Each structure stands twice: as C-alpha cells, then as structure tokens.
Amino acid sequence: FLFKEDLNVHTPPDIYVMTTAWYGVSSTGNQADFAIAQLANDAAQEYPLGAQLLREFRYVDDGTPSANTKQERDQMLSQAEHILARGGFKLKYIVKSGAPPPEGASTDGEQLKTLGYGWLPLPDVLRSGFGTLNFNPKRRGAKRPHVKPIITIKDIEDILEAMDLSRRDVIGKVAEFFDPMGMWEPVKFQLKRELKEFNNSDWDQPLSPEQKRHWIEIFAHFLDFPSLEAPRSVVPEGADLKSFRLICVANAAVEAAGAAVYANFTTLTGKSHTALLIAKSILVSSTVPRNELCAILLMAELAFMVRTNSPIPPSEFIYLTDSTIALSWCSNQDLKLKQFVLNRVESARRLIQWTTQDDDSPLPLYHLPGHLNPADVLTKQRPINVNEVQAGSVW
C-alpha cells in the first residue's frame, strides 16, 4: 500500500508490502484465500492431486477431499502439504475416514463439525449438527446451559411454562436444524409446513395456549435429532465407477413440491447400491399439476448441480415423476402451453439437456407409480418420525 506522511503530491509516496497476514483486519481472509488459490495454480503441474484438493475441495480454510483409494488419498494430502508449505501455511490437523480424529480436532474424541454436520470419522457417518435442546438466549455467541438437561417432553414443559413463546422463538429454534444437503428433508418439510401458521403474525406476539401446547409436542421430536445419521460415502466397496448413474425423483401435492437425487452403483459382484445425494422441498400454492411441474424443475436443478460438482461423471441419468400431466407438458413440444407452464417446461428441459449433455435424444423423463416414489414423503402432511429418514430406511 502507499503512504505519505506529509501528503505532498509533488514527491512519490512510500511503498509498503505486508509480509504477514494481520488477523483482525477485514481483508485478511481474502488475502489468505487468494494466496492458497495462487499456490495451487502455480504447482498444478508438479502436484496435480494437491492442487485439485486446494482448488475444488476447499471451503475457506477447511478441506473435504475424497479419493477412490487410500493410496490416492494419502498422495493428495502429501502434495497439498507441500504446496501450502511454499506459502508458509501449515495444516492444523488431518482427519481421515476409518480412523479416530487426532487430538485437537474433536472435543469428545469421536465427532467433529464439518460444514454444519457432525462427522464421525471412525464409522464414517454424518450426524445431524443439532445439539442439545436449549431455550436460553445467546450471549456473545453462546447459550448458557439449562440447570437441568432437557431429555423428556416433561422437561420441555417445565422450561417453557414460565416463558412466552413467540414466532421469533419458534422459527429460531427450527432454524437450528441445519441440513443444507437435505439428508433429512422430510422432517424439515413438516417443520416448514407448521411454520406457515405464523405468516401473518408479529415476530414477538406470544403464542396462544393451544399453539404453545402444539409446539411443545413438536419440540419433543427435536430430542431425537442428534441421533440422525447417514453414511458419508455413497460409493459402496467394490463399486464399478463406470456404472454410476443418477436417479432423480420428483413429487408434489396441494401445498408442496419436492425432489431428491440418488446415486446408483453396480458392484463388481453384480449387486446394485443406491444412496441419497441431495434433496429439497419448497412450499407452493398452485394447482397440483402445476406444483408437479415445479417439482420436476426443482429435480432438474438439483441434478444439474450434482452433475456439475461430481468428481465421477455419471454414465446415465433417469428422471422420474408420478404426474402424467406434467410429464406430457415436458415431453410434447407441440402442445400450446400457458405462460406459467411454458416457462417452467423450457427451464426444466434446458437443465436436463445441459446435465445429460445430449440435445438430440428423447428427454430421459419417465413415469413412476406414486406408491413407489420415495419423494412422496417430501410433500404430504404426516407426523414427524425420524425413523423414516434414518440410515437404512427407504428414504
């Protein structure tokens, strides 16, 4: 940067160069991020795997790379360390799947936070990042624990008896259930449905006794959220990577549309393995066929995101819907459609063609009977049940 104490415009300013990042200065994070990216670009030919890690599998100062073999993984980590050392960076710790986390990486020796989820590296499973139920306000970024832990619905009743619950309190508590990948989207959808009753309420208006009782019953399900688990890897042992295909499902109802994308592999022994990759639900308010079309568009968007970011190129794409009307809209280009329908049909077709990278073949969109559609749980009103979304469930 340039500096001149006397501000004399007729003499050249002094030039200063920062050789150390100053923590607390707002630009420090961007400086470090640029430096790491530049180091990766400069060393890409010498250390290709390490450069790939730093460019594609890093978020700010956290990296979540994956590899097909342990040898490739260790080589990638070693190369990344060499690249970072050139810029004076040193890894704080390295956590590997199949092994316990090193000292300092975890507070309990079993789990650590990874992009909002809890990761147990030894069994290699992801866990909901939701912690203990706590209704105390935040002070300096932390909540004071309750004197008595909340482990039963009676404990929730005792805590909330003297509190005036408001829309702000309820939405704040629901927002703590952070699940960006939609691993447990059916549960999130039911919570979003319940929140609709507050659309015209003031943020700090106390809930009625009936509303308060209803939300106490819902909060009782939050006690099960910390136990939600899902396998981190969707690639089974002994998988034929060339068999990888995306199976995408969409569904809608009166007030919601949802979609999910699954990864399917065939192992070298001939067995088929399918696992959830990503899911999302949205609240809608049109006719059911139009809602089904919105679900197809949402499915196309999710599949495009997966295809764009997948390190393994899928060999096949299958899109499924249980709506014959929406399927007809998308498949028959000779139909004269209303503007609402036409816009979404064109967007869905375009995204599917971008994803499959095939403009000439028929659209790979097929009909699936409703009772076989796993996305059905994303759109129908039903009791909250965490067992429906646990590892090993149909979902």
Image (cartoon, helix red, strand yellow):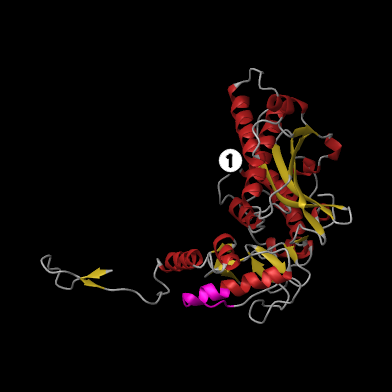
**Residue lying furthest left:** 10
> In this rendering, does residue 137 appear at all?
no
Inspect the image, locate mark 1, and give the three-letter code of the amino acid beneath it.
Asn
Question: Quadrant of the rendered structure where residue 92 is?
Answer: bottom right
Q: Position of residue 1 (x, y in %)?
A: 28, 69
Rendering coords of residue 291 (x, y %): 69, 32
The residue located at (53%, 65%) in the rendering is 45
Q: Is residue 364 visible?
A: yes
Disc 1 secondary structure class: loop
Relative height, residue 167 to residue 359 (above, below) = below
Residue 111, compared with residue 325, is above or below; it is below
Residue name at image x 49 percent, y 63 percent: 41
Which quarter of the picture shows residue 332? top right
Q: Position of residue 189 (x, y in %)?
A: 71, 46
> Which one is in front, 254 or 269?
269
How many neighbours does mark 1 have within 10 angstroms: few (below 14), some (14-19), or many (20 or more)? few
Residue 297 lies in the magenta-colored region? no
Image point (57%, 76%), residue name? 91
Read off the residue under disc 1: 200
On screen, residue 17 versus residue 209, left or right, reads: left
* Of residues 189 and 352, the one drawn nearer to the viewer in this rendering: 352
Give the extent of the magenta segment: 81-92
Q: Is 86 contained in the magenta span?
A: yes
